[in-house]
Image (cartoon, rainbow, N blue to C red):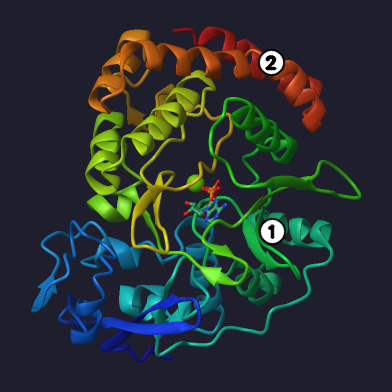
Amino acid sequence: MSFVNVSVVNVYFVSGNDKLLVGRLAIKDRKIFFEYNADFLKTGIEISPLKLPLKTGVFSSNDRVFDGLFGVFNDSLPDGWGHLLLDRKLRKISLNPGDLSPLDRLCYVGHMGMGALTYEPEISSAAIPNYEDLDAIADETLQFQENDNDRFVDDLLAMNGSSAGARPKIVIATSEDDWIIKFRSFLDPKDIGPIEYGYHLMAKSANLDVPKAKLFPSKKGYGYFGVKRFDKMNGKRTHVHTISGLLHVDHRVPSLDYETIMKATMWLTKDHRECEKQFRASVFNVLSHNRDDHAKNFSFVMNTDGKWLISPSYDLTFSSGPSGEHCSTVMGEGKKPSLDNLLKLAEVGGIKKQRAMQIISEVKLAISDWNNIGKNAGVSSDSLKMIKSRLDRVSV
Ligand SMILES: Nc1ncnc2c1ncn2[C@@H]1O[C@H](COP(=O)(O)OP(=O)(O)O)[C@@H](O)[C@H]1O
Ligand SMILES: [Mg+2]
């Protein structure tokens, strides 16, 4: 069987009950083009101000970072887990995933992606299955990973909702809220759920802006980390842009420095308070040994007035990073960022030394309570000890 590629994709921006046509994507000889719809230009909504400024004419990307796709649309595509699911599904029906262009993949996302953008024509996926039994889903994800077992691919794909990230996850909508629930990959420790929940509590105590989160209970082991979606609240969608998509930076290659993250924050939000929030989150990553700080783990959200803010912090957990270094260096230092590196970063964000020191000590205080916080979150005693010993080594 061969795949019939799409040549044109309509992009929409969903805001409240309105669905605005943003523009059209087209592909020819693997080159991707985009043009804004004339009416959308009048709205003043800048979905991606650096790479797709609001202006007339046809854009084509000069780089191949996302296979020629613009970063803001690449942000809608699942990577890692979601990408794997779709590829396995395609193979199951005798299609070659390599035949799909990024535009085809956007059609699989349709209206199920994260954030405010939707895509048509939509290639419909299976009906949403029942996700009442999280233990059963966790088993399916592990069997899927360990045994190359494709029996569950349709269910898992439908429940993934085109979310990004490497770990297995599903998106669910309860009567009140929309949640992301994360499962264990076979490389993760058994208590990864409580560990991430402990980190969430620690971040909250360090005054980071974090979404509501909880452990969804398991009948047979550790609970599952669930976090409330900040891109979809009370049924309303919010436009989100990762720093990877904004700057066209590949998140799989360590190529970013916190200096760039801070400068991008200042440039996009034009708000000193956002720089201070970004600084606090950066200090937390350094002091909490969260080294998976790649370009897709930082995002910006657009509020209803069209103003950009940094998103609540997410994916905060203990991680060792590539070769024991941070994915994103801190003023050039990846292995052991120092107080001096952090203070230089504060300077980039226009944060006075005294205020920076205050933020650092607030974060330090929260992290020094790991044993209690982790224990209350249900982390195993082995993980508690291992993480504590690593945290003690990260001193600034
Ligand atoms: N609370 C949230 N609301 C909306 N989007 C989120 C939230 N948490 C994470 N995301 C998005 O989902 C992606 C995957 O989540 P993440 O926690 O980073 O998973 P992983 O551990 O697999 O990387 C993130 O890159 C981010 O774009
Ligand atoms: Mg992530």
The residue lying toward the viewer, choosing from 98 and 312, is 312
Choose top left, top right, bottom left or bottom right for residue 64.
bottom left
Question: Label 2: few (<14), some or many (≥20) within 10 Å?
Answer: few
The residue lying toward the viewer, choosing from 40 and 374, is 40
**Residue beneath disc 2:** 369
The furthest residue to the right: 219
Q: Quadrant of the C terminus?
A: top left
Q: Residue 117, position in %: x, y?
A: 40, 73
The residue lying toward the viewer, choosing from 40 and 94, is 40
Q: Quadrant of the N terminus?
A: bottom left
In the shown orientation, is residue 174 left or right of residue 351?
right
- SS of the residue at dot 1? helix
- Name the residue: 38% across, 30% down: 276
**Residue beneath disc 1:** 141
Choose top left, top right, bottom left or bottom right for residue 240.
bottom left
> Which circle marks residue 281 in the picture?
none
- Name the residue: 70% across, 31% down: 198
